[in-house]
């Protein structure tokens, strides 16, 4: 619990001003890229390749020429890149700040080329296509070279709202471990924005991490340790701007998507043992499934 509290205090310090937030991001970019280059591609990312390709195939989600939007594309553009390797589509990759790591990016995709044949089932035509694109990516000298090669678009908007895009612009909108960072105060409007941006019949695909992110720094606490704290305590001592989480639970997420006008296609809720923590009264009305849910993966569709 000491590491948990110390980490929370450090993250709150980095959240004090625009200057400290920029310092956090600069340090994070430098140190995190070094860590990722040193560690290389791991099973977590390989499993993500399988998941996005299986979903696309299961529901016949992507058609040639589709326009897609990735929300919170991050340092690697992982899902966007995997989709583009297998499909001829246009993808807009949206984020609130630039945290791209070109060195780590090249390392991950270099390693992906080495293992993809034994990890992913591909027919000969797919195999030739994927390796041709991966070789071209590895020869690129900048992100702009890769974007031009693959027809990708990278968009930064610090507000976090995708308001610059026109109605019904995209056939699919997707994210991976992003929506838990959207400010709770704008969350319903954000999901309504994604509904507005989708074409009728379009798909919404999101994987949401519902765990306490301070747990990643101190695994001696419960994976959902934040359930112990009322809002006033959480905001005062633990909430921060640089690694903000909205503490929205499973059934609330499902309700937000439904109220925005989406039809549920698939829900996968992964649960974990949260231990014997004393749950705050604000959360005691939640179901056991909501309390124990640490990962929520949902597929929705916009009705015709």
Image: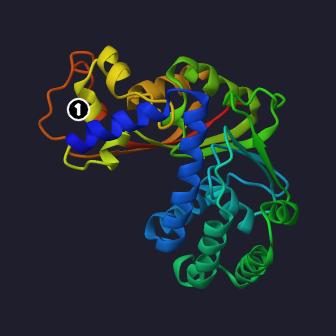
Report whether residue 155 is seen. yes
State the image quarter where residue 111 is shown.
bottom right
Q: Which quadrant would the N terminus be assigned to in this image?
A: top left
- Rendered view: 16 above or below 275: above
Report how many numbered discs are placed on residues in the image.
Answer: 1
- Rendered view: 49 above or below 222: below
Residue at x 77% of width, y 78% of height = 129
Q: Residue furthest left?
A: 276
Foreground residue among 69 and 288? 69
Report whether residue 261 is seen. no
Residue at x 26% of width, y 28% of height = 227
- Rendered view: 122 above or below 65: below
Where in the figure is residue 57, as x and y percent of width and height? Answer: 62, 60
Where in the figure is residue 201, as x and y percent of width and height? Answer: 72, 37
Q: Which quadrant would the C terminus be assigned to in this image?
A: top right
Where in the figure is residue 180, as x and y percent of width and height? Answer: 48, 35
Q: Residues within 10 Å of mark 1 (few under 14, many from 20)?
A: few
Q: Which residue is mark 1?
A: 288
Q: Is residue 146 left or right of residue 80?
A: right
Where in the figure is residue 255, as x and y percent of width and height? Answer: 48, 23
Foreground residue among 288 and 138? 138
Residue at x 27% of width, y 16% of height = 282
Q: Is residue 89 left or right of residue 123?
A: right
Q: Is residue 86 left or right of residue 2?
A: right
- Rendered view: 203 above or below 43: above
Label 1: state its secondary structure. helix
């Amino acid at each position: 619990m000491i590491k948990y509290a110390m980490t929370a205090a450090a993250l709150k310090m980095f959240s004090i001003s625009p200057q400290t937030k920029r310092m956090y991001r600069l340090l994070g970019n430098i140190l995190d890229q070094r860590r990722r280059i040193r560690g290389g591609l791991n099973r977590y990312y390989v499993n993500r390749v399988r998941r996005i390709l299986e979903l696309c195939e299961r529901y016949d989600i992507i058609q040639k020429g589709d326009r897609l939007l990735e929300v919170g594309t991050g340092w690697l553009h992982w899902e966007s890149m995997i989709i583009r390797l297998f499909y001829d589509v246009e993808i807009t990759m949206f984020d609130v700040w630039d945290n791209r790591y070109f060195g780590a990016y090249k390392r991950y995709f270099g390693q992906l080329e080495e293992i993809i044949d034994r990890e992913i089932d591909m027919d000969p035509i797919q195999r030739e296509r994927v390796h041709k694109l991966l070789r071209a990516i590895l020869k690129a000298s900048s992100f702009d070279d890769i974007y031009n090669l693959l027809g990708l678009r990278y968009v930064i908007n610090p507000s976090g709202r995708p308001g610059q895009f026109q109605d019904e612009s995209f056939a699919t909108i997707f994210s991976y471990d992003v929506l838990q960072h959207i400010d709770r105060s704008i969350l319903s409007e954000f999901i309504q924005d994604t509904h507005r941006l989708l074409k009728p019949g379009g798909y919404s695909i999101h994987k949401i991490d519902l765990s306490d992110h301070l747990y990643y720094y101190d695994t001696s606490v419960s994976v959902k340790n934040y359930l112990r704290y009322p809002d006033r305590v959480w905001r005062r001592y633990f909430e921060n701007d640089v690694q903000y989480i909205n503490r929205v639970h499973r059934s609330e997420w499902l309700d937000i998507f439904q109220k925005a006008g989406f039809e549920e296609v698939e829900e996968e809720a992964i649960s974990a043992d949260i231990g014997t923590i004393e749950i705050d009264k604000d959360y005691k009305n939640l179901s056991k499934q909501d309390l124990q849910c640490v990962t929520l993966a949902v597929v929705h569709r916009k009705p015709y």
